[in-house]
Image (cartoon, rainbow, N blue to C red):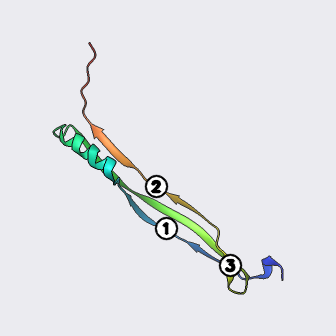
Amino acid sequence: MPLHNKKHLSALKPGLISSEMKGDAVKSLDGLLELTNGIVSSKGRTGFFAGVNADIPMGGSLSVEPGIYYAQKGYELSGDFNIKGS
């Protein structure tokens, strides 16, 4: 039976995503940021997530589910460094 005659199910998956940094390196970074007395700050970012996938039956209980996804991620490090050259 040709593949184009089989029933294909597809799904659109939209949503929100919240990004933040975690781990030992971030703990060290947070320690350094505390030394700046608020001059430098950091925060995660809320972004958009979207994707689409299709369920393609291959026969019996076997199917393939290809998909493509986009996730808007990020992390912000900001501050007023007020650096002046000599």
Q: What residue is disc 2 on?
A: 72
**What residue is disc 1 on?**
14
Who is closer to the viewer here, 70 or 58? 58
Residue 75: x %, y % from top left:
37, 48
First-in-chain label (1 vs 2): 1
Using the numbered discs, state the Cα–Cα distance from disc 3 to disc 2 in whole angstroms.
29 Å
Question: Which numbered tag is attached to residue 63?
Answer: 3
**Does 73 appear above or below 8?**
above
Mark pair 1, 2: CA separation: 12 Å
**Is residue 70 rendered to the left or right of residue 21?**
right
Measured in 3D between alpha carbons, the distance from the residue under mark 1 to the one under mark 3, in whole angstroms, is 23 Å
Q: Residue 12: which quarter of the image?
A: bottom right
* Figure quadrant of residue 1: bottom right
Query: At numbered mark 2, what does the secondary structure look like: helix, strand or loop?
Result: loop
Q: Quadrant of the C terminus?
A: top left
Q: Residues within 10 Å of mark 3 (few under 14, many from 20)?
A: few
Q: Amino acid at mark 3?
A: Ser
